[in-house]
C-alpha cells in the first residue's frame, strides 16, 4: 500500500446510484449517519467540486477518491487537474474500455497512450491510477491483459476492484492486489452474483445475500437471504468453496500478526468491571449528596454506577483508571478483620488515646494503654497527628473498631 495516510472505509456512490439520482442529499446524510467516513463519487450531481467537497466535509466525511472526472476520457488536463485538486485529492482516476485490452496490438497501443497521459499529468503533480473491470483480467496469450500494462508502466497506480478482479470466479483477487500492492493506494471491496449477465448489481438488487463465518476446521455460522424462489446445488457449492478460500486466506494473514488469543487485553484498552457490595454500603459508596462517588470519578477518570442491589459498575478508559476506581471502592467498603495488622495515619489525639484512619476512610481507636509496651503518661509522648503507624485490630465495641499499636509491634 501507499505510504500516504490510510484512506477511510468509504462508500462507492455508484453502488447506490439509483437512490443518489433520486435524492443525493438524503443518501449522503444517511451514509454519514451509518458511520462511514468517506465517499467516492461517480457524479457530482450538479454541484461544483468545491461545493461537493464542502457538503461531504460538513457531514464529517471526506472525499477519499473519485470516478469523476475520468482522466482516460477526453478532457483538457488542466481542467481535470483543477477539479481533482478542488475535491482535495492527489491522484487522477481512469479506466479502460474492453477494446483497449482485446488483443496484444490494442494492449501495446493502450500502454503508449497511458504513458503519454501520465507524462501530461506529471506536470500537474498528479499520478494516474486505474480502476479495473473484469475485461482487464481476461487472458491474452496466456496472461491477464492487465499484467502487460502493469509491467510496462511501473509508475502507474491502481485501485483494484476485487469483485471485477475475480473475473467471475476465474481469478484470485487477493493475488491480483499482492502483485501491485505497493502501487495500490485504494481497493474496492464488494460482492455480487459473479455472473457475466448480471455484472452491474446495485445495492439491494442481488439475488442472494450470503455470509459464511468459520475457522480453518469448518463453518461456525451461515446467513443467507435469498430473493429468488430457490438455489441450485451448484451455486451453493461454488459459494461455499469461495467462502472457504477467502476465510483460509484471511485467517492466514491474521495468524501472521497474532496466532493465538492474548491472555489479557492491553493496558490502554477500555475496561469495564463490576463488583458487588453489601446493600448497607451503598450509601457509603455514594456519599452525602453523591460526594464520594463524584470523588471516585474525578480521581480515577472512570464512570461509576451503583444500582439498588449493590452492583457497582466501573467503566474506565484504561487499566490504570479502572484500578484506581476499584481500589477506592474496595477501601470504602472493606471490613476490618480481627487480629489483622494495617497501616494507618493518626487523625486525632485525645487524652485517652488516638483515632487512626487505617482502612480507606475507616477509623479506629488506639487506647492510651495500647500505644506502647510500657506505661504512657501522655498520648503525645508517643505519637502526634499525621504520624504513619502500624495498628492491629483487637476487637469491636458497638460498631467501633479497637486498635493496638503495642500488639502490632510484636
Image (cartoon, rainbow, N blue to C red):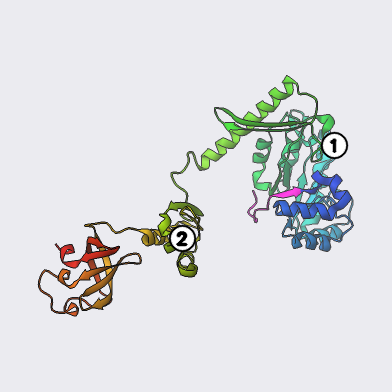
Please name the residue that numbered disc 2 is placed on.
Answer: 321
* Other residues around mark 2 within 10 Å, as few (<14) / some (14–19) / many (≥20): many
> Is residue 147 visible in this depiction of the protein?
no
- The region drawn magenta spans 1-11
Of the pair 55 and 4, the residue shown nearer to us: 55
Left-right relation of 172 to 362? right
The label nearer to you, 1 versus 2, is 2
Comes first in the chain, label 1 or label 2: 1
* Location of residue 321 in the rendering, given as x and y in whole percent from the top left corner: 46, 60
Up-down relation of residue 354 to residue 197 (above or below): below
> Is residue 208 visible in this depiction of the protein?
yes
Residue at 66%, 37% in the rendered image: 174
Of the pair 281 and 258, the residue shown nearer to us: 281
Q: Residue furthest front?
A: 398
* Location of residue 220 in the rendering, given as x and y in whole percent from the top left corner: 58, 30
Secondary structure category for the residue under label 2:
helix
- Magenta segment: does it hold 210? no
Please name the residue that numbered disc 1 is placed on.
Answer: 98
Of the pair 117 and 357, the residue shown nearer to us: 357
Residue at 13%, 79% in the rendered image: 377
How many circles with numbers are drawn on the protein? 2
Amino acid at each position: 500500500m501507499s505510504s500516504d495516510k490510510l484512506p477511510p472505509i468509504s462508500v462507492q456512490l455508484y453502488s447506490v446510484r439509483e437512490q443518489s439520482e433520486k435524492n443525493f442529499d438524503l443518501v449522503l446524510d444517511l451514509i454519514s449517519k451509518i458511520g462511514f467516513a468517506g465517499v467516492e463519487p461517480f457524479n457530482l450531481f450538479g454541484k461544483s467540486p468545491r461545493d461537493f467537497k464542502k457538503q461531504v466535509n460538513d457531514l464529517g466525511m471526506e472525499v477519499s477518491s473519485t470516478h469523476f472526472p475520468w482522466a482516460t476520457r477526453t478532457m483538457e488536463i488542466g481542467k481535470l487537474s483543477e477539479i481533482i485538486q478542488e475535491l482535495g485529492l492527489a491522484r487522477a482516476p481512469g479506466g479502460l474500455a474492453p477494446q483497449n485490452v482485446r488483443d496484444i496490438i490494442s494492449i501495446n497501443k493502450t500502454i503508449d497512450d497511458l504513458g503519454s497521459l501520465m507524462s501530461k499529468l506529471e506536470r500537474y503533480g498528479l499520478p494516474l491510477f486505474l480502476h479495473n473491470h473484469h475485461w482487464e483480467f481476461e487472458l491474452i496469450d496466456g496472461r491477464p491483459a492487465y499484467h502487460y500494462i502493469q509491467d510496462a508502466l511501473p509508475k502507474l497506480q491502481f485501485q483494484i476492484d476485487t469483485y471485477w478482479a475475480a473475473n467471475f470466479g476465474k481469478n484470485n483477487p487477493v493475488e491480483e492486489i499482492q502483485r501491485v500492492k505497493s502501487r495500490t493506494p485504494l481497493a474496492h471491496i464488494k460482492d455480487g452474483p459473479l455472473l457475466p449477465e448480471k455484472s452491474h448489481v446495485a445495492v439491494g438488487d442481488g439475488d442472494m445475500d450470503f455470509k459464511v463465518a468459520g475457522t480453518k476446521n469448518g463453518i461456525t455460522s451461515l446467513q443467507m437471504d435469498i430473493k429468488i424462489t430457490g438455489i441450485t446445488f451448484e451455486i451453493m457449492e461454488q459459494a461455499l468453496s469461495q467462502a472457504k478460500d477467502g476465510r483460509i486466506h484471511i485467517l492466514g494473514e491474521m495468524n501472521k500478526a497474532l496466532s493465538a488469543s492474548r491472555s489479557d487485553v492491553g493496558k490502554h484498552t477500555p475496561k469495564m468491571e463490576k463488583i458487588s457490595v453489601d446493600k448497607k454500603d451503598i450509601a457509603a459508596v455514594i456519599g452525602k449528596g453523591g460526594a464520594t462517588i463524584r470523588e471516585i470519578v474525578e480521581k480515577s477518570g472512570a464512570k461509576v454506577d451503583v444500582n439498588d442491589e449493590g452492583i457497582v459498575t466501573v467503566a474506565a478508559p484504561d487499566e490504570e483508571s479502572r484500578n484506581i476506581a476499584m481500589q477506592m471502592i474496595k477501601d470504602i467498603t472493606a471490613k476490618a478483620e480481627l487480629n489483622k495488622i494495617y497501616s494507618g495515619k493518626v487523625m486525632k489525639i485525645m487524652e485517652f488515646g488516638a483515632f487512626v484512619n487505617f482502612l480507606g476512610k475507616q477509623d479506629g481507636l488506639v487506647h492510651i494503654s495500647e500505644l506502647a509496651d510500657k506505661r504512657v503518661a501522655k498520648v503525645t509522648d508517643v505519637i502526634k497527628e499525621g504520624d504513619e503507624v502500624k495498628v492491629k485490630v483487637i476487637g469491636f465495641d458497638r460498631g467501633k473498631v479497637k486498635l493496638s499499636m503495642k500488639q502490632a509491634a510484636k
